[in-house]
Image (cartoon, rainbow, N blue to C red):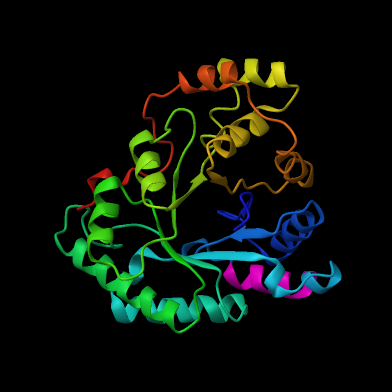
Amino acid sequence: MPRLGMGTFRLQGAELVFQCVEAALAHGYRSFDTAAVYGNEAAIGQALGALLPLHGLARSDVFLTTKLGPRDQGKAEAEAACLRSLEQLACGYLDLYLIHWPGTQGKPQGDKGNRERRWESWRALEQMHHAGHLRAIGVSNYTLGHLQELLAHCRVPPAVLQVEFHPELPQRELWDFCQQHGIHLQAYASLGCGQLLGRAEVGRVAERQGRTPAQVLLRWALHQGVGVIPKSVSPTRLAENAQLWGWDLSPEDMAELGAMDCSRHYCWDPSGVT
């Protein structure tokens, strides 16, 4: 699994998707992250189908991730949703399939049925994994409690946990747990939905390193072994976001960024999901 991938949240329209995927491939991206709820699986599949041969690449050269929509929790529902994603992406198999959210769309966060429905979904993912449709399976937006519950009952442990992760939300306890149990942590919202780009601490580190604030925030995650999936519709920023190798943050840089921890979510907080 490449440590750098291209995120596609809110990337809409076949032409824009094609342009972004083309730029990403040209700048060395070999991992693409989407989800059923993003509504762009078909466009991404079409773009990859057309562009991979032009770049001398095969399906096996890219890592493709998508996610189960919260409305599709449950064994039969999850299996049907997974097959729909495979059809939309026209990719033969998925490298990684995640349960997107621990709750169920249309149900209260405190609904006691959430636990049973996500467990039934995981059973469906395990079966699809054994059948060869899914190379790896994992979860997104799970808390420590959700993860512990899953590991207590699963036959196939999650390979990946994808969560909001940045200097203001470093999720130390969750990071430690994943390290101990061989679960790869992958960050989304690495830039704090853009809010962290103007932070003074990030700016000082960027100036010392001669890098952009975005590069600093992405490298901060990579420094800790956490994968990143930044998104952008700008070819220039796609290129900049890929320039994360051959340099690193100093202990001073890491300490300054680490002091920003305030447990702030810019996206969704799953802690209330039963």
Furthest toward the left, the residue is 112
Of residues 242 and 235, which is closer to you in this image? 242
Of residues 122 and 12, which is closer to you in this image? 122
For the point 78% across and 47% down, which residue is it?
235
Furthest toward the bottom, the residue is 131
Prevalent SS, magenta region = helix
Q: Which quadrant of the figure has residue 156?
A: bottom left
Of residues 220 and 16, which is closer to you in this image? 220
Question: Where does the magenta region start and end?
Answer: 41-51
Q: Is residue 15 magenta?
A: no
For the point 63% across and 48% down, which residue is it?
231
Left or right? Give the position of 47 relative to 181: right
**Where is residue 37 shown, x and y percent of the image?**
47, 63
Counting the numbered discs, the total is 0
Quarter holding the N terminus? Answer: bottom right
Q: Which quadrant of the figure has residue 239?
A: top right
Left or right? Give the position of 59 relative to 123: right
For the point 64% across and 15% down, which residue is it?
204
**Where is residue 75 shown, x and y percent of the image?**
29, 78
- Is 12 situated above or below 123? above
Left or right? Give the position of 87 relative to 19: left
- Is 6 situated above or below 126? above
**Where is residue 248 shown, x and y percent of the image?**
67, 29
- Is 178 situated above or below 128? above
